[in-house]
Amino acid sequence: MTQEPILIKNVVPLSFLKDLKLRASTLKSWEFTYPTTPPDVEFELEKKFPKLDLTDNIGDNPPKDMLLGQSHALFLLIHARGGFRYFNNYFQWCGISIKDKYWEGSLHTDEQNTNRLKVIGVLNPDWDPKWGGNFLWNNKEYPLYPGEFLIFNPRVEHENSPIKCNKKRMAIDFAVDPI
């Protein structure tokens, strides 16, 4: 998929996003390992952001497993609302990230050795794209509204636009196999 990212609107009630965001914010298993880089490139901590890998160590953490189940339900809604045209009804990976106005961004690519697609959306039910944190892909900005999700080719450089408010923006992303 080299075409522009595809937007799927009206995927989920905002109350669902609010609950998912609340559950994610209470977990203690956040890591600073993203963005991942090739072995010969070193990213300093200041260029990393907190990410929660929901598909790592399944069964070891019941609250995280519950969040994974809820994320799977969200994924199935994305698939049913139009994702079925582009990807299979399962995901290979799922994570949640936190970014704020102190995040300077890091233009990067993902999934270099696969043909996977990624799906991304914000979890903040009250997020306003005027606050920043929008999706930048191939030098174009895509606003992220709550309840909407973008399908994109992660092998094209991407990052988020600067956040201009005091809120933390949470986003969920899925790595999926195309149909």
Image (cartoon, helix red, strand yellow):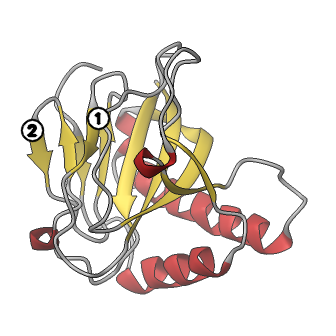
Q: Position of residue 118 (x, y in %)?
A: 42, 37
Using the image, determine if residue 37 lies above or below residue 56: above
Crowdedness near tag 2: few (<14), some (14–19) or many (≥20) residues, C-alpha within 10 Å: few
- Residue at 36% over, 82% down: 14
Q: Position of residue 50 (x, y in %)?
A: 53, 59
What amino acid type should be assigned to the residue bearing mark 2? Lys
From mark 1 to mark 2, how far is it between C-alphas? 13 Å
Please tell me which residue lies in front, 111 or 131: 131
Disc with the residue nearer the chain's start (1 vs 2): 1
The residue singled out by tag 2 in the image is 140
Q: Position of residue 91 (x, y in %)?
A: 59, 40
Crowdedness near tag 1: few (<14), some (14–19) or many (≥20) residues, C-alpha within 10 Å: few
In this picture, residue 130 sits left or right of residue 73: left
Using the image, determine if residue 105 lies above or below residue 9: above
What amino acid type should be assigned to the residue bearing mark 1? Leu
Using the image, determine if residue 59 lies above or below residue 91: below
Quadrant, the N terminus: top left
